Amino acid sequence: MEILKIAIQKSGRLSEKSLELIQECDIKITEGKRRLIGISNDYPLELLYLRDDDIPQYVADGVADIGIVGENEVMEKDKNVVLVKRLGFAKCRLSLAIPQDVDYPGLQWFNGKKIATSYPNILKKFLKEKGIQVTIEEISGSVEIAPSIGLAECIFDIVSSGSTLVSNRLKEVDVVTQSEAVIIASPKLSPAKQKLLDGLLFRIKTVQQSIGNKYILLNAPNDRLEDIFNILPGMKSPTVLPLHLTGWSSVHSVVNEKDFWGIIDKLKECGAEGILVIPIEKMIL
Ligand code: ATP
Ligand code: MG
């Protein structure tokens, strides 16, 4: 039987969320992390724990069939892989940053400067398009300290909240690209592996659809039901069950967290009582 091999980061910012995603798909992983390979008894899936930098290459070479990695690494390595799904976590941006006390007139400021980065290819491509010439100092980590130790005048690096920049007396002056965790796949998957990938993607979609949604149950007098239906978004139409008490019904529906409190207030105004809110594990639409 075919097994789908998935590369995930061994240890770092993507590791926990990647494993969590797989586990939320009801795929339990049995072997420990140190063994470099994890297997599952629930799904024909094998996990390869790797450095994130290596994941695009392993997938392009077909050593792994698919991988979970930051879009930034996919862009930087520019390997022959297919981006099959954006995952919505590890969101960050790749930005140019300069010392806080320097006036910034625009991108031309970078002409002739020395820039420290772990992403030389993305940077080169961007600056070439803008017609700006620089010297790139490639380093593999702690890029943000480069200006203070005199290695470079400015940096091109991952930014999320910006607090690392501030604590290193730097300011973000240009966002070059956005990034999030993605699933990449080898461009030449066998039909059997493609089917396993499709099955996995279906499970992921099911998990993601449930995010932020709550199942809501309430009791309401029958003469207010129409008002209540107008408030509840629901998946198709709310479920209504008669209560033993004459003239009352129980209404069930699905509500998203973002509209949640507004909807609860309106429901109460319409006479809803005994409102229960229950988490949803999976949603299949
Ligand atoms: P490895 O040892 O596997 O090479 P690493 O040190 O290169 O790991 P991490 O710092 O673990 O990488 O980051 C992994 C990925 O997480 C990055 O490539 C990026 O996509 C994302 N990421 C990094 N920093 C942040 C951040 N501050 N906020 C959100 N996402 C981030
Ligand atoms: Mg790395």
Image (tube, grey):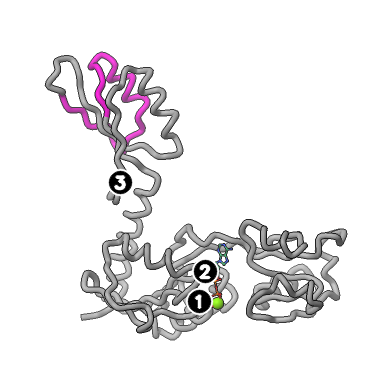
Classify 10 Å Cα crowding around label 3: few (below 14), some (14-19), many (20 and above).
Answer: some
What residue sits right under mark 2 in the picture? 70
Distance from disc 3 to disc 1, alpha carbons, whole Å, reads 32 Å
Is residue 239 left or right of 17 when viewed as pictured?
A: left
User: Which structural element holds mark 2?
Assistant: strand
Of the two numbered discs 3 and 2 in the rendering, the one whose residue sits closer to the viewer: 3
Asked if the residues shown at circle 3 and circle 1 are in contact, with their CB atoms under 8 angstroms apart, the answer is no
- Percent position (x, y) of residue 251? 24, 28
Distance from disc 2 to disc 1, alpha carbons, whole Å, reads 8 Å
Which residue type does callout 2 highlight? Gly
Does the magenta run of residues contain 221?
yes
What residue sits right under mark 3 in the picture? 280
Q: Residue at x 45, y 80 (%)?
A: 50
Q: Quadrant of ligand 2?
A: bottom right
Would you say the beta carbon of the disc 2 residue lies within 8 angstroms of ligand 1?
yes
Classify 10 Å Cα crowding around label 1: few (below 14), some (14-19), many (20 and above).
Answer: many
Residue 285 visible (yes or no): yes
Vertical placement of residue 268 versus 62, above or below: above
Would you say the beta carbon of the disc 1 residue lies within 8 angstroms of ligand 1?
yes
Q: Which residues are magenta?
A: 218-242
What residue sits right under mark 1 in the picture? 52
Is residue 269 left or right of 96 when viewed as pictured?
A: left
Q: Residue at x 34, y 82 (%)?
A: 37
